[in-house]
Structures are given as structure tokens and as C-alpha cells.
């Protein structure tokens, strides 16, 4: 599944802050961009842009750890429908962040979104800040159970030793903040709003 991540010229982008700017977005013909949502309010915009730029913008729907309290049964239902109805949809950006947000809510949202990714057999984009051990623990559970979806660790800032573990689980990395061991598969990202 690492070949999937290799397709992207930008494996991690976001929506413009102002929804009115969506109309100004221009995507070069050679670009392939993974466009991540951060909360349910983003889902329609991401879906619209993916339809406007088919094959160039790949949609990722998910609830970012900062907004984990917005993860609820209704959001889960909406996400399931999007994964069923949207060609090429992924889950992202999800994960854990000790620096901001409600950590118990983050863990619940992270686990449930990983389970959906496994059920729908779609890749996930993962955000990790100061939670490398806990993220490894959760990913290991899915890995041992044989249900770990393909995943990308974006802006990875953990240790090279832990990167080897994530790589052993089949993970890829985008724009790491540290030099990684040679066995780690790295792809480019902007982590910026589309323009």
C-alpha cells in the first residue's frame, strides 16, 4: 500500500480558512493532492472540491484530535455514508495530541475512525503530538489483529527508533521533522491550505 502514498505530489493539504476562497483554488494538471478535513463542517467542502478536481484532489474525511468532541454517532454515520458514496475517499486527519483538546475524547475518536478505515479498507492520515507511545500501542493492537489500515504519519517528529516500529507496521511518513532511517517511506506534503 506504500505505492498509494507515492502517487501524491502533496500528501497532506487543508482547506482555505475562508470558504469563499474555495472558488479561487486552481490545481495544476500534474498535481495529486490529499485534501484533509479536520471536523464535520469541512466534509461538504472537501467533497465538493474532490468532485471539481477529479483525480487531482483526493478527499480525506475525518475528525482531527483538536475537535474530537465533535465525534459522535451522527458524525460517524455521516462519515460512513461519505466513505460508501465517495470514490477514492480516505480518512484524515485523525490522531492524538497531548498539547490541545480532550484526550479521552481523542482516543475514542481515533480508535473508532481507525476501525472504520479498516472496515471500509481505506487509508488514514494520522496526526501525532507528544503521544508516540500511545499511538504505537493503538496501532499495534490493530496490527496484531490484522485490521490496521494503511496509514501516513504526517509531520512526524518522533524518534528514529519509533519510526522503525511504525514503518514495520506498514506506515508511511510525510515531511518528517527529523531524519528518518532509510527503511522509512517518505512522501511530500505542504500541510497548508489549498490556494
Image: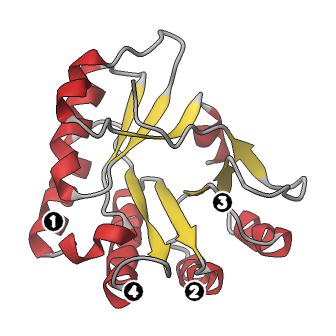
Percent of width and height locating residue 125:
49, 56
Nearer-N-terminus badge (4/2): 4
Residue designated by label 2 = 134
Between the residue at mark 4 and the residue at mark 2, the CA separation in whole angstroms equals 11 Å
Residue designated by label 4 = 103
Q: Nearer the viewer, residue 143 or 29?
A: 29
Nearer-N-terminus badge (3/1): 1
Question: Residue 153 falls in which quadrant of the image?
Answer: bottom right
Between the residue at mark 3 and the residue at mark 1, the CA separation in whole angstroms equals 26 Å
SS category of the residue bearing label 1: helix
* Colour approach in the figure: secondary structure
Residue 7 to residue 134: above or below: above
Question: Residue 100 falls in which quadrant of the image?
Answer: bottom left
Question: Seen in the image, is 2 located left or right of residue 139?
Answer: right
SS category of the residue bearing label 3: loop
Q: Which label number is shown at residue 75?
A: 1
Nearer-N-terminus badge (1/2): 1
Between the residue at mark 2 and the residue at mark 3, the CA separation in whole angstroms equals 16 Å
Residue designated by label 3 = 171
The residue positioned 26% from the left and 50% from the top of the image is 83
Amino acid at each position: 500500500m506504500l505505492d498509494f502514498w507515492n502517487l501524491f505530489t502533496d500528501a497532506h493539504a487543508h482547506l482555505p480558512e475562508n470558504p469563499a476562497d474555495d472558488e479561487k483554488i486552481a490545481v495544476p494538471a500534474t498535481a495529486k493532492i490529499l485534501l484533509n478535513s479536520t471536523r464535520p463542517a469541512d466534509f461538504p467542502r472537501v467533497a465538493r472540491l474532490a468532485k471539481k478536481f477529479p483525480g487531482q484532489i483526493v478527499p480525506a474525511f475525518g475528525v482531527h484530535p483538536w475537535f474530537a468532541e465533535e465525534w459522535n454517532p451522527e458524525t460517524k454515520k455521516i462519515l460512513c455514508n461519505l466513505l460508501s458514496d465517495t470514490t477514492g475517499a480516505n480518512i484524515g486527519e485523525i490522531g492524538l495530541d497531548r498539547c490541545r483538546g480532550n484526550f479521552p475524547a481523542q482516543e475514542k475518536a481515533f480508535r473508532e475512525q481507525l476501525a472504520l478505515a479498516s472496515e471500509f479498507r481505506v487509508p488514514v492520515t494520522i496526526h501525532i503530538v507528544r503521544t508516540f507511545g500511545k499511538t504505537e500501542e493503538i496501532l499495534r493492537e490493530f496490527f496484531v489483529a490484522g485490521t490496521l489500515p494503511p496509514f501516513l504519519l504526517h509531520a512526524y517528529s518522533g524518534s528514529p527508533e519509533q519510526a522503525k516500529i511504525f514503518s514495520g507496521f506498514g506506515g508511511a511518513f510525510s515531511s518528517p521533522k527529523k531524519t528518518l532511517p532509510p527503511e522509512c517511506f517518505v512522501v511530500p506534503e505542504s500541510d497548508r491550505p489549498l490556494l
